[in-house]
Image (cartoon, helix red, strand yellow):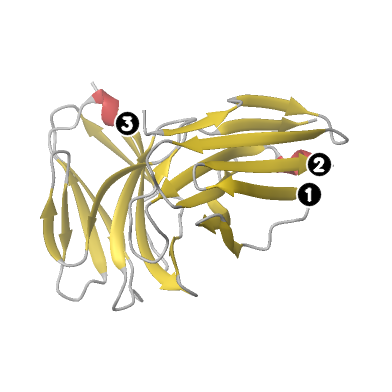
Amino acid sequence: ETGVTQTPRHLVMGMTNKKSLKCEQHLGHNAMYWYKQSAKKPLELMFVYNFKEQTENNSVPSRFSPECPNSSHLFLHLHTLQPEDSALYLCASSRGTGEPDTQYFGPGTRLTVL
Amino acid sequence: LAKTTQPISMDSYEGQEVNITCSHNNIATNDYITWYQQFPSQGPRFIIQGYKTKVTNEVASLFIPADRKSSTLSLPRVSLSDTAVYYCLPGSTTSGTYKYIFGTGTRLKVLA
């Protein structure tokens, strides 16, 4: 248990569906991250939030829409996804973003797009 | 950002010491070196971090030579539960954000 929870753990959706992934951290951290891990590929950083403000968007397609209402919660809204978006989506948090702080990862959401 | 090279896979036996070396030839002056462990279908977990020389904690040691162009993660007396992927992560601050760039990692398999 890392103090970072993600729901749902598994999600199957069609290309026309709209769904959301939720991440919550109980560590008192100020920074939160979304990563994507496709099969046989390295983790890819998608978004970074610090004190609820987005500080990084790693050229992610607009069909992925993040939301950070407060420092403890992070959402990833999904719409009109493609089958190649099927992957493990990982959330992480850290104290801040300006130093080499340890990032604590959640267990991930396994997303399958049909 | 520094690019890393580490073995794709390694096999070891229970009770042995395992050393995984990572090269990061163009590491920047302000980069730290961090190692993470990942089990299948789980998020990566922090193991150890260092800047130079040697760092030791309860699970591993990290050796970094003076030129910092490589680092070696040492796992003493591995067990079957150490079977995982291990990532070497030099990180650096760009545009005010400290970032880790994950490579493909080293897949360690511990055999009985």
Distance of mark 2 from mark 1, alpha carbons? Answer: 5 Å
Which residue position is annotated with label 3? B83
Whether residues under marks 2 and 1 lie with C-beta atoms below 8 angstroms apart, the answer is: yes
| Pointer 3 chain | B
How busy is the neighbourhood of tag 3: few (under 14 within 10 Å), some, or many (20 plus)? many
The answer, for residue B1, to whether it is visible in the render is no
Q: Is residue A14 left or right of residue B17?
A: right
* Amino acid type, callout 1: Arg
Residue B40 appears left or right of B110: right
Please tell me which residue is depicted at 22% across the width and 71% down the height of the picture.
B68
Q: Which residue is mark 1?
A: A63
Residue B96 image offset from top left, x and y in percent: 46, 72
Residue displayed at 13% across by 29% down? B15
Can you tell which quarter of the image residue B57 is in? top left
Q: Is residue B45 above or below residue B40?
A: below
Callout 3 touching callout 1 (CB < 8 Å): no
Residue A34 visible in this rendered orientation of the protein: yes
Do tags 2 and 1 sit on the same chain? yes
Residue B61 place in picture, x, y as percent: 14, 49
In percent of width and height, residue A23 lies at 55, 37
Task: Tell me what residue is drawn at x 17 percent, y 47 percent.
Answer: B74
Q: Residue furthest front?
A: A70
The residue lying toward the viewer, choosing from B80 and A2, is A2
**As displayed, is residue A47 above or below residue B44?**
below
Q: Residue furthest right?
A: A16
Q: Secondary structure at mark 1?
A: loop
- Mark 3 vs mark 1: tell me if same chain: no
CA distance separating discs 3 and 1 = 36 Å
Task: Return the mark for residue A79.
Answer: 2
Q: Nearer the viewer, mark 3 or mark 1?
A: 1
